[in-house]
């Protein structure tokens, strides 16, 4: 079973590169689209990290108020 799962995973990763491959010049995308995508991902990552930190902070504060 593990061998089958490994085989399917490897095939998926090998096919994904071909499936998403395209000619960059033919898309008509703006030269700043990579910058915008990177900035958007950075903002989203920062927001997720801040939310996770706030949740952990609230949980630890609740535990410290009632250690029993």
Image: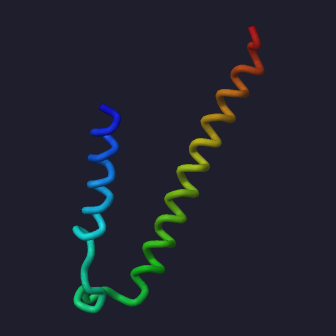
Name which quarter of the figure residue 63 lies in.
top right
| Residue 6 appears left or right of 28 | right
Establish if 47 lies above or below 2: below
Q: Which residue occupies the foreground of this view, 61 or 32? A: 32
Scheme by which the image is coloured: rainbow
Looking at the rendering, in which quadrant would you find the C terminus? top right
Q: Which residue occupies the foreground of this view, 59 or 12? A: 12
Q: Which residue occupies the foreground of this view, 23 or 41? A: 23
Total labels drawn: 0
| Residue 61 appears left or right of 20 | right
Q: Which residue is farthest front?
A: 3
Establish if 61 lies above or below 49: above
Q: Position of residue 8 (x, y in %)?
A: 27, 47
Q: Position of residue 45 (x, y in %)?
A: 53, 57
Name which quarter of the figure residue 15 lies in.
bottom left
Q: Residue at x 77, y 21 (%)?
A: 64
Q: Residue at x 58, y 42 (%)?
A: 52
Establish if 48 lies above or below 38: above
Q: Which residue occupies the foreground of this view, 35 or 55? A: 35
Q: Residue at x 61, y 49 (%)?
A: 50
Establish if 36 lies above or below 28: above
Looking at the rendering, in which quadrant would you find the N terminus? top left
Q: Position of residue 58 (x, y in %)?
A: 66, 31
């Amino acid at each position: 079973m593990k061998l089958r799962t490994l085989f399917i995973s490897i095939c998926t990763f090998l096919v994904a590169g071909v499936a998403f491959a395209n000619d960059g010049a033919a898309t008509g995308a703006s030269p700043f689209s990579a910058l915008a995508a990177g900035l958007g991902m950075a903002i989203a990552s920062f927001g997720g990290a801040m939310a996770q930190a706030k949740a952990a902070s609230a949980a630890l504060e609740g535990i410290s108020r009632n250690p029993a």
